[in-house]
Image (spheres, rainbow, N blue to C red):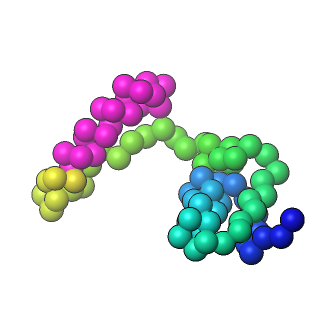
Amino acid sequence: MEFDVAIIGGGVNGGVFTALDLALRGGLKVVLLEKGVIGGGTSGKMHGLLHSGARYVVTDPKAAVECAEENKIIARIAPSRG
């Protein structure tokens, strides 16, 4: 097998989305190497808190409302994380 890029580490923010971006937008053949479970390291230890959107209330009220609505959706579909 031949690849253009090898990414070591399957963290959700770094490895997985970098691989996806390179493959979809860059058109590259990518291999993702992970010794454990994808997203099981630091990504999997996320503390479960959601951004409230409060920081946007004054400067970007629309973004604040979107954060609040997204939090309601996440709390409904993943109650153990909300």
In this rendering, the count of numbered labels is: 0
- Determine the image quadrant of residue 37: top right
Q: At 56% from the left edge and 65% from the top edge, which residue is drawn?
A: 24
Residue 12 shown in magenta: no
Q: Position of residue 17 (x, y in %)?
A: 57, 59
Image point 86% across, 65% down: which residue?
1
- Is residue 74 within the magenta segment? yes
Seen as rendered, the residue at the extreme right is 1
- Name the residue: 60% across, 49% down: 43
In the image, 11: left or right of 73? right
Left or right: 8, with 52 as reference point: right
Q: Main secondary structure of the magenta part?
A: helix
Instruction: Write down the quadrant of residue 49 in the picture.
Output: top left
Instruction: Name the one closer to the observer, 76 or 29.
Output: 29
Q: Nearer the viewer, residue 7 or 50?
A: 7
Q: Quadrant of the C terminus?
A: top left
Measuring from the top left, give residue 79's x and y in whole percent: 43, 24
The answer to whether residue 61 is above or below residue 22 is above
The answer, for residue 35, to whether it is visible in the render is yes
For residue 65, above or below residue 2: above
**Residue at 62% across / 43% down in the picture?**
44
Q: Which residues are magenta?
A: 64-82
Say whether residue 7 is visible: no
Left or right: residue 57 versus residue 39 is left
**x, y percentage for residue 54?**
23, 49
